[in-house]
Image: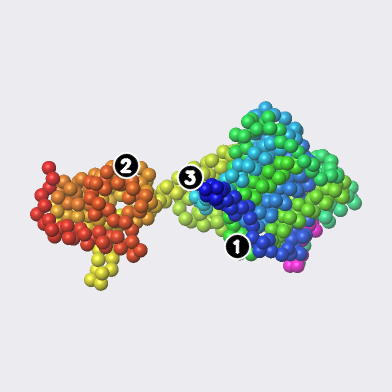
Amino acid sequence: MRSAAARVRPRARLRARLGARLRVPLRAFGRPKTSDVSAGLVTGLFSIPEGMAYAAIGGFNPVAGIYAGVVPTLLGSLFARTVLMVTTLTSALALTSQSVVKEAGLDALDPGNVATLAVLAGAVMLLLGVLRLGVVMSFVSNAVMTGFSTGIALQIITGSLKDATGYKPAGHNKLFQLGDWIAHLGDWMPAAVFTALAAVAVWALVRLVERLKPVAVLVALLVVSVAVGVLGTHVELAGDIAPVPGALPAFTAPDLSAVGALLPGAFAVALVGLAQAASIGPSVPNPDGTRSSVNGDFVAQGLGNIGGGLFGALPTGGSMSRTGVAVSAGARTRWTGVFAALWLALLVLTLGSLAERIPMPVIGGLIIVIGCELIVGRLPDIALVLRTSPLSATAMIATFLATTQLPLQQAIVIGAVLSLLLYCVQAARQSRLHQLEEDGDGRWRISDVPDRIEPGTLTVLHYDGVSLFAETPRIDEQWPDTTDARGAAVVLGLRGVPDVPSSAVLKLLRRYARDLRAQGGRLYLAGVEPRLRTVLRRTGITAELGEDAVLPPTSEIFGAQREAAARARQWIEEAPHRTPEA
């Protein structure tokens, strides 16, 4: 009977595992820089009008968009392994959440429903991170990720066209919206256009001074906002969307009765948020040189959603646009996100009425510039993919078009399928058989596989590939002819193949063994990993080959092949006149 201590041990290990996912080393926080404080202020200011606009687009209470920049941003920045990633509301998340709530037949203005959706989405993100399922993102090809992130940048731009010019382009296709926006140049509001251009001009002028580059966005935001107020320019203001509350978010209890209706949609919301965030790490590397962790970012976003959902926030995720704002404003450490949340809370408490005076064209103009910078930053990756191969280029373009023309959750599925297709094609192309021949010094030399096995000879082959799954036709094509292999032996090296995921592979190995045995020959398998060895024994293939013909891997490179070759030579010498089996 197990002792109490033994029963507790698995629980302790589980708690330790969970703690390891949530824990960020103290040294990872670093010391905040002066630029982090100003970058946090800029990001916090942007969170007021942009958060309100995104929430309003989704049909939610605009205040929930503001609150999405407080608790979620704070928790996300504290735990994220992509240190400059800002966790907050995005337009894609707002629209996906709207679709989920509508499909569930629930009221989007009910705080309990919003809290339930955010907490459920956060729980999904947290679970994926703790289970280390972020490894799936490593199989997303660079071509697909380049197309996806470029499409997201275009979404950022098209989502700000109305704020910058006063004209809202028609259509769901982002490329069509861009064309419609250009075609209706005459419908642009001059006051909005001039305000947006003024913000961009001030931003560009300030950036000419090297020392002022980190605060260029902040200076442009403040200077043009004051100018609009002094001149009395009639443009849309943040307060026109909804009044900014002069209070911090209060605790909001999730509506447990809505869990069943919202749970399926929560997975879609979580995947959209995680996919958007996955494009941030490659685009915005950590300034301190540390590596990002997709699993760590999953956990951070999960905690941000759970905490934010309990305090009035909409579902959130890593925001490319808000991260771009923070980086442009001089962000250097994760403290930028922490300061952004604190500044936003302070602004809401003390200067809510002044924040309502921020002109939306200023926000729109600066967001468009940031989106263009993100696309320009991707141009080297785009050129690299185009030079790599036609298949990679096609995958990139297809993902870009899907991201701009379809709902984001559908674009994610398409990108995942394309990544899987690219992976399988590349793996199949790389897989092949080689012949190993020993030279006079006892070293192995790689050569092409012979067309046929000569009688009474030893042939050593080595399989080079990812796994035997889906590569059997290619291997079968390269396998030498054994119709006249009287008394011959073939050694097949399988080092690195952990298991056999297809019964077709077992049939192939059995056929090779029987074809050789029919000619009085024999097949040896070298470098067989333990899991594969178990499968071979369980399916009876080991019994057909003989225990001495299945050799485990050794510490020496090609050591198992060398040992198998020695056994095969001895077998050939001992039975030179072996007759074929009937």
Q: Image quarter for residue 90?
A: top right
| Residue at image coords 23%, 46% | 544
458 drawn magenta: no
Looking at the rendering, the stretch of residues picked out in magenta corresponds to 210-220
Structural distance between the alpha carbons of marks 2 and 1: 44 Å
Structural distance between the alpha carbons of marks 3 and 2: 44 Å
Tell me where residue 55 appears, x and y as whole percent: 73, 40
| Residue at image coords 32%, 54% | 528
Tell me where residue 161 appears, x and y as whole percent: 72, 44
The residue indicated by pointer 1 is 290
Q: From where the camera sits, is residue 538 visible?
A: yes
Q: Residue furthest bottom?
A: 441
Going from N to C along the chain, the mark reached first, 2 or 1, is: 1
Marks 3, 2: nearer the viewer: 3
Query: Which amino acid type corresponds to the residue marked 2 in the rendered image?
Result: Ala
Q: Is 134 situated left or right of 363 in this image?
A: left
Going from N to C along the chain, the mark reached first, 3 or 2, is: 3
Q: From where the camera sits, is residue 448 visible?
A: no
| Residue at image coords 75%, 63% | 35
- Number of residues whose C-alpha sits closer than 10 Å to that of mark 1, classed few (under 14), some (14–19) or many (20 or more): few
- Number of residues whose C-alpha sits closer than 10 Å to that of mark 3, classed few (under 14), some (14–19) or many (20 or more): few
Q: Image quarter for residue 458?
A: bottom left
Q: Is 535 situated left or right of 261 in this image?
A: left
The residue indicated by pointer 3 is 1
Tell me where residue 466 appears, x and y as whole percent: 39, 52
Element on which disc 1 rests: loop
Element on which disc 3 rests: loop
The residue indicated by pointer 2 is 504
Marks 1, 3: nearer the viewer: 3
218 drawn magenta: yes
